Amino acid sequence: MLFLIISLSIALSGLLVAYALLAKVHSISVKSAANSNSGFYGAEGALNTRAEQLRSIFIDYRQPTGTSPTSLSACMDTDTTNNGSGDFSCQSQTFAASSASSNGLIAYSYVVDSSNGQATMGTVPPGESFQNLNMLEYRYSINSVTQQANASSGQVTAMTEMAIKSRLVPMFQFAAFYLNDLEILPGPVMNLSGPIHTNGNLYLGSDNGLNINSQVTLSKNLYSFRKNNNQTYPDGRVRIMNMAGTFLNLLFNGTGSTSPTTSAMDANRVATAWGSQVKLGIDALSIPNASILDLNGDYSQKADLKILYTPGSNATDIPFEMTSISRSSTGSVNSTTVLTEGERRSLLQPVLVSQDLANISDINYKPCTPLTDAQLGTTLTSIRNALKATPQAVDNTINQRNNLGNALYTALVSQTNFIVYNSGNPSFPVNSFAITSSIDSFPSTGDGSLTTSQKDSLKAATPQQIAAVLDRCFVSAPIQDIGRTTSPAFRNDREARDMRLLQINIESLAIWNKVGRYVTFSGNTVSNNNSGLGFSAEQRIFATESVASGAPAGSFQNLGLAGSDISEGGFVFHATINKTTYTAANSNQSPYGFALVQAQQLPGLAKIGNSDPTGLTFVSDQAVYVQGDYNTLNWQPASILADSLNVLSNACLNTNSVIHKASGANCNTGNGAAKIAPTPTTINSAFLAGTDITNSTAAPGYNGGLENYPRFLEGWGGVLLTYRGSFVSTSTPVHVRGTWSSQLYGAPNRNWDYDTRFNAAENLPPLAPRFVYLKQESFTRNYNQ
């Protein structure tokens, strides 16, 4: 018996196109020895098949699981109880005979998890494309054996073994990642600290300075001029750091001259100056088209919350459907909850905040503030003080307070019209039987007692006053329909049309999921209000995590409002519209979109100690508008994926907590009200969205460059916009085609950079797009000669 062992330590050649979420995978190409017989080809084919299966599992954002058999002989015998299980179990493949005189082959294979399911954190080695990027690496050994189809179990034709590493490299580890040409041409100085990649050409320039300190990879040519008008830049305006940590001028080191030019940088000079730090002409990476964002796309299929926009024309129409999906840690569906009419109507009304939330001391986390004593007046203040003086251990008094709050909230969600928030003072009838009964139930003497006069005063109070007596207050509705006839309009000048936007208030949504109440409706009529006290909406949208004492005081995580979802790394919310019913949504002039407001704090889990943070990924196949500070409190991994991405400042939320914008730059404070100037805003989130191509048929002229990746609708006039994240562009916009030159805006002062927290895999947003590639460590052949 002679065993020939060939050990190969080679990177796998070629990159497989992986549709998926954007994955790109090195294909396994096993090189056969010159004298190999057909048995080895069969065994190697089995290796390739199993490696492809592992790759596909990782692309699907899962991890291989199961048990391995003890040996290949277990795969070849007739006892099926020792074949292992799951992704590592025995498999067989049959290969047809090569000629009539020969028998076919059967290849048996199994997988061993060499890393015991535990990934190793590492970095892509220097010199390779995507060098120094963090990666998760799993190790596997694949074993295969072939025998003639009619041979006994002990007769083996060939045996092979391959050790591989599965590497997961996130796309959000790039400062900018583009499918098409990428232009970075800022006016003010811009410093970029993350890698840059484009499948097209790269155009770099700046009026005052562009400094890039990470690897640059591109599939085509590198230029230093403006693509739209051929404007060139003097030497020194663009600098890229080399492997030694020294910034080198692009123009001189790329051309050998300081003279501005529209010619491409010389590949040999670039290689000499920067080595692997700047790599030109690499194979184009294959990334998915915009369909992954659709209703039937991967993100929708893996979402934890699905929102379907159904814009109506009447004031009482419910403009959305909502489905909550509970998943296991592996992503499989445990249960599905379709929110009822009553629950959806409740989400369109202001939310009565609980006492513990209203009493948060940190103003940054405080959702609302109850009326002060001065605002309440003497009589109502005396009522509040009387109830405050009651020992909280007195269960009866607590129940009475809770019943009054529940009755007040139930009266609100029983309205068929959607109540205006009105700066925390919603106006709706409070003379319901349940409210009156709750007030009358307070005793006249002893703990928690109220006099008849006090009870009468409380019955005559407004909703805001009753809430304040209970040390509670209102926040705006979690969901609002922007652009109906009866609501403020939102004009997008770039698209030259008024938009219909479903506004999602992230803060209110999380609060409603904990303290919300609803009643049962049948059509526009209440069918069951639970004796005027309503039903609890707790955890109707997502399950919540227990209180985390280590989280910032007053945060969702600290108070038990944060979600406990860990499937796909955290929450995935998907929002779309039925394009069959609303046909304009399927055009390139869609008037529909989604707006995210009051999202300073997200409903996922931030890192505490050694815990893994979760976070939120919001996805839509329509335009998305991000209003105000985003993910600035209790930071957690976050990303927004959309057909196009629009940024609105903190100023773009009026006193009714809705976004409103008439024609012209800047938002409006209310219907017919004056414009309001933008205010400083901070966003911490990765972006994936469509961008135009300069001088293309669809978008003639300049596309605005990377500095205009987010679309602006306000006259920022140098107001600060701070951004930490990652810009990924996988296509041109499908549903909005307005050109950059049509925008009415003033540029902000851009304090932008790559979020280096994404370098750690645990800090990546849920279901983050990534490359997956397999690297072969060794390959062994054993055969009997």
Image (cartoon, rainbow, N blue to C red):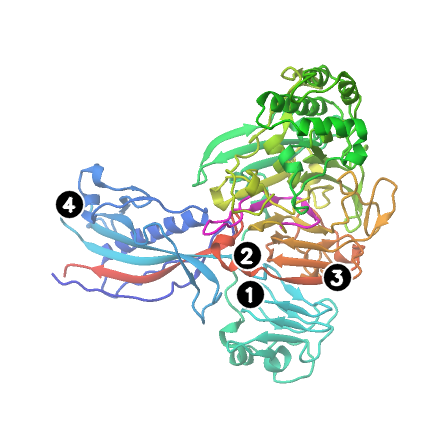
- Name the kind of residue labelled 1 in the image: Pro
| Disc 4 target residue | 153
Q: In which quarter of the image is residue 694?
A: bottom right
Q: Is mark 2 on a helix, strand or loop?
A: helix
Residue at 54%, 47% (x, y): give it. 551
| Disc 3 target residue | 701
Question: For the residues carrying marks 1 and 4, which lies nearer the camera in this image?
Answer: 1
Query: Which callout, 1 or 4, points at the residue further toward the start of the chain?
Result: 4
Residue 172: which numbered mark, if any?
A: 2
* 2 and 4 marks in contact (CB < 8 Å): no
Dominant secondary structure of the residues highlighted in magenta in the image: loop
Q: Distance between the residues labelled 4 and 3?
A: 70 Å
Q: Which segment is the magenta one?
A: 603-631
Question: For the residues carrying marks 2 and 3, which lies nearer the camera in this image?
Answer: 2
Query: Which callout, 2 or 1, points at the residue further toward the start of the chain?
Result: 2
Q: How crowded is mark 2: few (under 14 residues within 10 Å), some or many (20 or more)?
A: many
